[in-house]
Image (spheres, helix red, strand yellow):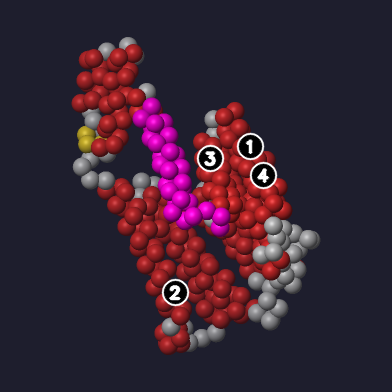
Amino acid sequence: MKVTRKQERIIRRTLEGWCQEGVIDATEQQRLQQNLSVQLFDWQRLSRYAFWVALACVIIAIGSLVADEYLMALLFNFGYVPRAIGLGILATAFYFWGFHRQKHAPDKRYSNEAILFLGVLFTALFLWQLGMALDNGSGNIAPLFLTGCAIYGAIGYFGRSGLIWLFCLLALGSYFGTSTGYASGWGAYWLDMNYPIRFVLFGGVLLAACYLLKKPLQQRNLFGVSKAMGLLYLFIALWILSIFGNYDLDIWQSVRQIELLHWSLLFALAAFACIWISLKTDDGMLRGFGLTFIGINLYTRYFELFWDGTNKVVFFLILAVSLALVGRYAEKIWRLGEGR
């Protein structure tokens, strides 16, 4: 069995612990250890990073092409509709290619995901050109995001692709934001709610729908992505809400800090609720989100309340000591886990 150096250390410690506890004898321990083959170079990780960098280069290249008016005129000297059709055909081809490879070469995971991501990218370009073709001057771009959500959702659900489903949920959030913004005339408020409050509700509804549809989502391997996106929408919106409250930016500058305290408490309560539920259900994702955003909440309040009134040398020394204590506590937990 080929393993990395880190995996080998973990397996050897596990086998030693089992031998000491009498789960296996010394002969079995030695036999199992002999089957370990250390992979001196992590080619899998290199493959993942290489594909990430390659995709980033593709995005930069396409962005540079779009920004270059001469090249755009030279290569795409025709109307928006033909461009949209061509980009739609390219996106469809990448989706078919990616799913074909997933079926016949499932072990080539990173290259398959990279091909599907190109399909996602060309779908976004297709929608951009479609929007330019259908533009009537209203400024309402929400239907484009809804169309993207429908395309990504159908392909991601039936293709069991968490990557494409992720973009479906991102498009859904963009549709919600732009549709409520258009309905409010692009003002600060919609139904007396600014953007952070709207996305707190959106994240909560998305999280509730994720649990209501847990069984079909799990069957399609989409539950984890859906839950993570619901939590991300919810907690980022709560964090921004704890800073700005339900105020317009022009009004917010004159608001006293005490008037935003209840939003900070709501943010903390949501994080503690995640931790409490995770302790009941042993849910690592909820625990991670809860602990991370409790830390973000505490440090945000720390900067808000003590930045102006504290000497900067003292302030950063206190911050350094607090972070060192967090690191020391994390190291203690890590070493305890290693000992076990």
Element class at badge 4? helix
The span from disc 2 to disc 4 (Cα, nearest Å) is 42 Å
Callout 1, which amino acid? Ala
Circles 2 and 4 in contact, beta carbons < 8 Å: no
* Kind of residue sitting beneath label 3: Leu
Residue shown at 37% from the left, 52% from the top: 110
Name the residue type under label 2.
Gly
User: Which dot, 2 or 3, sits closer to the camera?
Assistant: 3
Nearer to us in this view, 150 or 293: 293
Magenta run includes residue 270: no
Q: Is residue 329 magenta?
A: yes
Tell me which segment is drawn in magenta: 308-336
Q: Earlier in the sequence, mark 2 or mark 1?
A: 2
Residue occupying image coordinates x 79% and y 61%: 191
Whether label 2 touches label 3, CB < 8 Å: no
Amino acid of disc 4: Leu
Q: Crowding near pointer 4: few (<14 within 10 Å), some, many (20+)?
A: few
Q: Which residue is mark 4?
A: 265
Of labels 2 and 4, the one closer to you: 4
Quadrant (top left/top right/bottom left/bottom right) for the N terminus:
top left
The percent coordinates of residue 93 (x first, y second) are 46, 64
Tell me the tag on residue 273: 1
Q: In 3D space, how far apart are the residues under numbered discs 2 and 3 (Cα atoms)? A: 37 Å
